[in-house]
Amino acid sequence: MTKMKRTALIPALALSLAACGGAGEAPTANDSAALAAENKAGLAGEVVELPGGEGDGEDVPLADDAVSASAIARADGWVGRWRGVEGLNLIVAKGDAPGRYKLDMQYSLDDKGVFDGTATEEGIAFTRPDGEHVLRATDGDATGLKWLAGKKDCLTVKDAEGYCRD
């Protein structure tokens, strides 16, 4: 799980003020270069520590910084029960942080489990004993299962494994 200090996103203004040290003191060229590097690191999603230990606190779990709000919103729309064929099913539940999910799956006649998933631009990525997968929005035809053909609101893990709502 990716963890990042709350101080990871620091506005350039706060960095500039902290480096100045007080009113009337102009930053030196070295201060300006250091501020630019810290600001660039903060914008890249890296952990940037404030001077003097300010901002120290507990770590907060976050989804991958590269994931857009729209990808998380799309995956949030998948929360609920999905039905496959022959008793196979999937329950998508929100996890412990934005962009995190619990996937409760009966994915074969003999295999079931609960797996942690993370929102990505492609869907919800997760790992189970048969490998790494991405749950993607599709229709019934794309699942490769004739019993789901014609359905419109479906999620597919891989060929011949899909779940639909309608």
Image: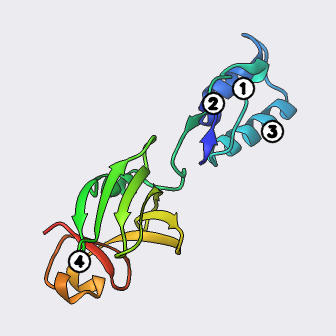
State which quarter of the image contains the C terminus.
bottom left
Q: Circles 2 and 1: CB distance less than 8 Å? A: yes
Neighbor class of circle 2 (other Cα within 10 Å; few <14, some 14-19, many 20+) is: some
Counting other residues with Cα less than 10 Å from the Cα at mark 1, is it few (<14), some (14-19), or many (20 or more)?
some
Residue that carries the numbered disc 2 in the rendered image:
7
Tell me the SS state at disc 2.
Answer: helix
Q: Gap in Å between the C-alphas at discs 1 and 3?
A: 16 Å
Q: Is residue 154 visible?
A: no
Label 1 SS: loop
> In the rendered structure, which disc, 4 or 3, sits on the residue that comes first in sequence?
3
Which amino acid type is marked by label 1? Leu
Q: Of circles 3 and 2, which is in front?
A: 2
Frontmost residue, 66 versus 131: 131
**Distance in Å between CA atoms under marks 3 and 2:** 20 Å
Of all residues, the one furthest to the front in this rendering is: 110
Disc 4 target residue: 86
Q: Which mark lies nearer to you, 1 or 3? A: 1
Disc 3 element = helix
Label at residue 33: 3
Seen at 37% across and 75% down, the residue is 108
Residue tagged by mark 1?
Answer: 50
Q: Label 2 vs label 4: CA separation? A: 49 Å
Between 105 and 53, the one lying in front of the other is 105
